[in-house]
Image (cartoon, rainbow, N blue to C red):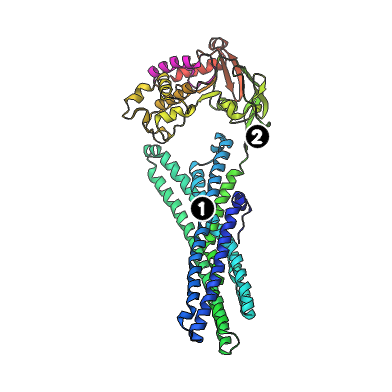
Amino acid sequence: MHFDRRLLKLLSGSKPAFAMTILFGFLGALCVIGQAQILSTIIHRVFLEKQSLASVFHFLGYFAGLSGLLFVLRWFGTNRATEVSATIMMQLRKGLSAHLTRLGPNYLKNERSGELNTTLIAGIEKIDAYFSQFLPQLFLAVLIPLTILVFIFPADVLSGFVFLLTAPLIPIFIVLIGSTAARLNDKQWQTLSRMSAHFLDVLQGLTTLKLFGRSTEQIKTISEISRDFRHATMDVLKIAFLSALVLEIVATIGIALIAVEIGLRLLHDKIAFEQAMFILIVAPEFFAPVRQLGARYHAGMEGVAAARRIFAVFDSPLPEIPNNPSLHLKNTNSILRFEHVSYTYKPDNRCALSDISLELQPGTITALVGKSGAGKTTLSHLLLQFLYPENGAIFFGDTNLQDIDAQNWRDQIAWVPQNPYLFNRTIADNIRLSNPAASDKLVREAAGQAHIHEFIEKLPEGYETQIGERGARLSGGQAQRLALARAFLKDAPILILDEPTANMDPRLERQMLDSMQHLMAGRTVLIIAHRLNTVRFADQVVVLSAGRIAEIGTHRSLLNKNGPYAELIRAAEVAA
């Protein structure tokens, strides 16, 4: 048998419905016992006592009534089991989504999207069989045989002991194959996850594979993974079919022993016919719940294998939040201050930022520059509270950011990442993501300010155009302008721009720089600059090198110092 304690804890909110499932199954067993008793009485009276059918007609009515009641009980039992399973799957989906949200984008960097997608969708679906089939049957496989024994022993003690001796053979066999079945199901699930992850990698990189002529190689790799999955699936099916065959043989032998024992005693008048007939009729029902448990055992083990991966996601440690943030901002026009902030990525202990002290004055523009890997993105993620300082603190006015409710803080920020994510929805929906309550007029104004309104208007469906997964129907520059439109629509006091003019031609870049001047006016702005022509109008330029501040100043003053910033400018001019 297999009780998974963490899976059982998920029943906490559905205990009444699950108890009803078991109750309906138990009442159904009582109906079957009643039918067996009625049938044995009818046969005894009609065939041995030679009574007319009319004399037992009322028994036939009882039998038909119990049959109808049995149908209703089984229908309600199945319905309740499905309800329990659906509720738990909904809770898991909500819980996983919430946990992944709290883990933040840095967790996803270490995960394969295809594998995680399989866990969130197929994995949770696999758990359905555990709660709707296996677990109820596990309880009934214990309860129903014991209930039948309560009726068998008063009818015939010897038959009761025969039942008692043969019944444990099936669960003992299930236990013996349990470890093998669990190992094979784990292997099958891991292979499925690997195959799903690889398929997604290939689909997302199809253009690159075609460009470098490597698609044939990937087809071979997919074939190899598919073959591994086929072998893993066949191994599971082999053990499933083999165990089902053995369980059927064991149950059949048990029923045969009862039949032989009853038959011999009938020949020697050691048992009454009516009692013997009752025992013979009820014998298959005695073994049926345990046989059904064996048939559903492998479906349950698939659920357990999927649950291990689901719980592994739940067990991923959340970013450490030293305080319990609950404050909500009232004054949104304060100094942003980094005080000796450091951050190290785990588990490789890579120091991303070290002893960063910096001030962002309200209404000013700060440009963050440096070579790749200098720590620019890490600093912005700390500001967005995707990460939390390992040492030091970030203050907004006199308030530590860690004392502010994270969502309330993010509501004050408009963020334009270098590679904005666009959902497979309409253009209007994607712009409105930053302000769901915005009217169509405001959406269009924001698009106009981002210089994308004219392009949208030329589309056949305008703002209702579906843009495809990850904005597949848009160019990189168009996607960037949609992200800028989101920032215009949000109208937040703090603005973070991660190379906002990436993927744009010089003419459009000039338009965007003019538009950005309007967007940045009166806001606290942090620009993460990779193309240095976007920092010339910054009030201060912060140069990062190997996670430390190399120098701070204006564009002109840093050029005059002829330090790291001047070196970056010269390198950019050479590259241009």
Image vertical order of residue 530 relative to residue 78, above or below: above
Is 116 in the magenta? no
Seen at 50% across and 12% down, the residue is 537
Is 508 in the magenta? yes
The mark closer to the camera, 2 or 1, is 1
SS at badge 2: loop
Name the residue that disc number 2 marks: 320
Residue in the foreground of this view, choosing between 328 and 5: 328
Residue type beneath disc 2: Glu
- Residue 319 location (% of width, % of height): 63, 35
Seen at 42% across and 39% down, the residue is 204
Q: Which residues are magenta?
A: 505-534
Q: Would you identify the image quadrant in which residue 94 lies?
A: top right
Name the residue that disc number 1 marks: 126
Q: Would you identify the image quadrant in which residue 102 lies?
A: top right
Dot placed on the residue nearer the N-terminal end, 2 or 1: 1
